[in-house]
Image: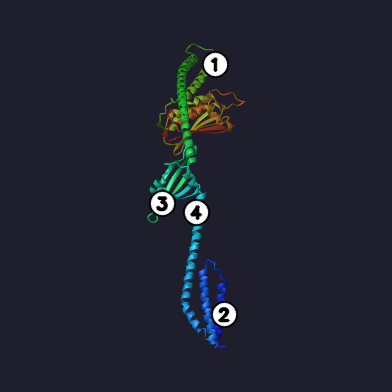
Amino acid sequence: MSLVAVADIVALLAFGAAVYFVLRMPGSSPAVGRYVKYTLLAVCAVYLVVSISNMLEHAGITDMFDVYEDFAEVLFVPLVAWALYSRLSAQRLLEAQRAEEDIRREHELLMNVLNTTPTGVLVADAEGTVRMANAVAEQMLACTLDGQLDLGEIVRGAPLSRLRTRLGTGESCLYVAVRSSPLASRGEGPALAVLSLADVTDRMRAEARAEEYRRGLEDAIDRRTGELLEANRQLEQASSTNQQFFTKMSHELRTPLNAIIGFSEIMLKGLSGPLTEDQSKQLEMVKSAGHQLLDSVNDVLEISRIEAGYSAIEVTRFDVNARMSDLTESMGGVAQMQGVDLVFEHEEGSPISTDPDKLDQIVRNLISNAIKFTDPGGRVCVSVMHDRDVVHVAVRDSGIGIAEEDQERIFHAFEQVEHPDRVRPVGTGLGLLICRELASALGCTVDLESRPGVGSTFTVAVPRQAPGHLVIL
């Protein structure tokens, strides 16, 4: 068998199979289409006729189909062109269908998103015609009265932002925040804009409630302020009355006390005649009781002056070592009467600036308390230690000591630590309170370290330079 015969047989089988497969191809397939199917079927049939004619001719059987073969060859080119055109058209149609499907899905997705958002979203033109709106926007537009929401004006003014726009009336009204953004217009049509309508009704009502509460609070504060001012006026009046009372009491008490103490000293010196031993002892008791009562009166008057603000602070520069040395020496007689050894220690240092009289008063009270609570034969030491910014004046005793739970209490008014094995010490219990108040006014601090049975150390930390914010008592 020749090569030409083999080629004819292969071509016949190939075109026959092509005709078979084209016949089996579904005409409703979007990738092919009915027109493409039948065009391909015509092309494959022409090739099949040409293949049969060539095989019969080459086998020498007949050449009667040569005339038809020529017609088939003439039809080949337009059929192939039509097939290609139909295939390209089907491809474009398929792509258009796919694009349309994508657009439809995206549109559905966009509408689902818009319908689930709590904000109203719509598209309108410059004439106020709504082109698209989600469900929330439709509900808001449904309750809008004429003249409340001019969509055309909002679109023409885009971009625009309105914080509060009222929709509807009565208790069912809404307050919305309106924002608009322009959209690119197509052709000669009116301008478009996308509008968002956010419901701010709850916020508006909350602000109204907050404003009402604020006004009520301001009224209450005004009333309370008036009451406090009136109470303050009454307190000032009472304080003034109290101060006047203490001033008068100071004169009324000190005058007879000074007379009692003075005449006792005159009689003890024998200026009024000789005294018996018993009379001298009794006069000493009168004198001592007079001094105790005078000290108590002075403490009460001092704390009243501090609280009333009548104790002025005078800052001067002085040598704290010399000042504390003189103060310790002046208290030596009291210590000697109690059988207590009173000593003074110091470091070299520069002068300080504060109120020397009030510092003396603080340290004098501390020394007096130390002597009072130290048994005969004990020791009280006053020391001055210099740091760069602070001077520490410490009063250390070997007395009975103070328990930790009582160390803060003793700085309160009329508080004293009592011991079952000791007689209650004389005094008003105001000395340490006066010390702390005066120290606070000078910008100082008073610290305490103590152990029962060992002794106590009161330390006054005095700034070298008096602070500029001193409280003027």
Q: CA distance from mark 4 to mark 2?
A: 55 Å
Q: CA distance from mark 3 to mark 4?
A: 18 Å
Instruction: Please name the residue shown 47% across and 77% down the image.
Output: 75
Residue at the disc numbered 1: 281
Q: What is the three-letter code of the residue carrying label 4?
A: Leu
Report crowding for label 4: few under 14, some 14 to 19, many 20 or more residues within 10 A (C-alpha). few
Q: Look at discs 4 and 1 and give the one toward the viewer.
A: 4
Where disc 3 sits, the SS reads: strand
Report crowding for label 2: few under 14, some 14 to 19, many 20 or more residues within 10 A (C-alpha). some
Q: Is residue 384 above or below residue 61?
A: above
Report crowding for label 3: few under 14, some 14 to 19, many 20 or more residues within 10 A (C-alpha). many
Indicate whether residue 111 is drawn in magenta.
yes
Q: Range of the magenta residues?
A: 106-112
What is the quadrant of the C terminus in the image?
top left
Residue furthest out toward the right: 420
Residue at the disc numbered 3: 192
Q: CA distance from mark 4 to mark 1?
A: 112 Å
Where disc 1 sits, the SS reads: helix
